[in-house]
Amino acid sequence: MRTKTKQLSFPLKGEISRIFMLAVAVMAAVSYANAEEEEDWIDRYKVDFVYQGVQYQILSESEKTVAVAQDYDIDFNVFSQPSRIMVPGADEIGENGFLDYIFTVIPPTVYDENGTAYTVTAIAHEAIQYDLIHNLVLPPTLKNLNGGIGALPIRSIYLPEGLQKLDGVYSCPYLENLYIPASVESISGLMRCGIRELYIPPSVKTIRDRSLSYCDSLSSVMISGVETMGKKCFEENGSLLRANLPETLKSMGDGCFNNCTKMLRVSLPWSEIKMNDCFNGCPSVKCIEVLAEEPYPFPDNCFKDVDRSKCDLLVPVESLEKYQAAEGWNEFYRINYIPTSGVVAKKADKDADFTATAGKGLISIVNTAGKQIDVAAANGEKMATVTASGTTELPLPCGIYIVSSPTSSVKVFVR
């Protein structure tokens, strides 16, 4: 019997192996095809020279620009100074010690074996992956990432001001915090990362397919200025508690915010947005806000798993009867109004260190003393912090906000 069992098991293992290899090949082909669709896709396997332990590919000989290429030695060459910087307080490099104390720095200018200088402007597709990198500092000359970063242990990435596309940070479960520069215009990536809170600046107009999906630790995200979301953005984010959709948003691809099982509150923009099959698999939603005075058609195939007998629908007080009669919206048993009467920016005291006024889709703050000004939603959720002197405009979803400094506070209503 043992012999017979062995004879049967080998073909079975072989078949499983073939199926596995076929699946890997298909996934690789899909990934490759998707990458090729990106106009800036760069082949990581083309290497022209090595500088301080990192491989580079020449992009333009006339402009003297290069991309980071495949980098097997990026974390193992301890002689790659000055691309590695010892943090003050670390006095030795042990067996694993340098992983905690060394920053991997990609310099803006690198040199080939002849001493010719090149400017680093890009990262090749999947060039930095599976490396033992904990802290990565990218050069200010970088314009896009090209799907180049997937380093499992990475804990911090310092993105440069001037970066235009955040197009390729993925599978970084220890990456808890990420600052997105105000120069970034589009996001495609940030899948399966450990980010806990995220602020997406107004400069970002597009979030592409599957971006910020499967981020199990993401509990809070502030979106401002985005106009388009691709398919399945923010899908399978099991810790996300709230979705504030900005007034600028015009369309969402299928599957956005699906299976966010802990989602409690959704704020829809003032104007109608095109969306289908979104916010499904979100049984915990207890409140949906919509401030459109005229009810727009209820989104198709959305909110399927929301218990409409227990979910509050909050609408403008003057539109309460309209929503009670509107198809789709009238399926909510508890349609209540948002108390907007009297909710305006209070006149700041003459000695106040800031003023705050709200309009349609934004709050304008004049920080006269340069102190820290905090902006929080009515439920206490912190939305933004302003420290710069002068005028700052914050694009925010409609709702009630508390703007406060150490000495005063005001309540404003964003329409």
Image (tube, rainbow, N blue to C red):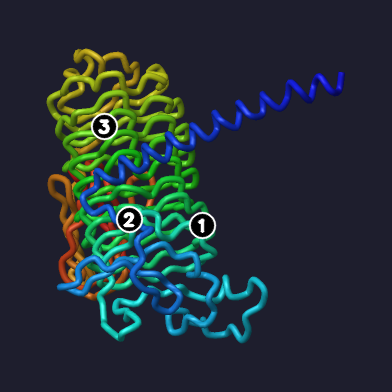
Q: Nearer the viewer, residue 342 or 238?
A: 238
Q: Residue at x 87, y 18 (%)?
A: 1
Identify which residue, 281 or 309, lies in the foreground. 281
Q: Quadrant of residue 302?
A: top left
Residue at the image position 13 percent from the left and 48 percent from the top: 359
Labelled pair 1, 2 in contact (Cβ < 8 Å) = no
Classify the position of the C terminus by image quarter.
top left
Give the numbered dot on residue 130: 1
Q: Could you give the CA–CA distance between mark 3 and mark 2, rounded to whole angstroms?
A: 29 Å
> With respect to residue 253, does 35 lie above or below?
below
Q: Are marks 3 and 1 in contact (CB under 8 Å)?
A: no
Task: Measure how far apart labels 1 and 2 are at the Cα level.
Answer: 17 Å
Instruction: Identify the residue position indicated by label 2 in the image.
Output: 43
Q: Amino acid at mark 2?
A: Asp
Camera-nearest label, 3 or 2: 2
Residue at the farthest right position: 1
Left or right: residue 206 compared with residue 294: right
- Asked whether 9 or 30 is in front, the reply is 9
- What residue appears at the point 33 percent right and 62 percent down from the top-left corner? 123
Task: Examine the rendering and report whether any part of residue 251 can be seen.
Answer: yes
| First of labels 3, 1 by sequence position | 1
Disc ID at residue 240: none
Is 359 placed left or right of 88 in the picture?
A: left
Kind of residue sitting beneath label 3: Gly
Q: Look at 80% across and 21% down and name the residue there.
A: 5
* Residue 383 in sight from this viewpoint: no
Give the residue at mark 3: 253
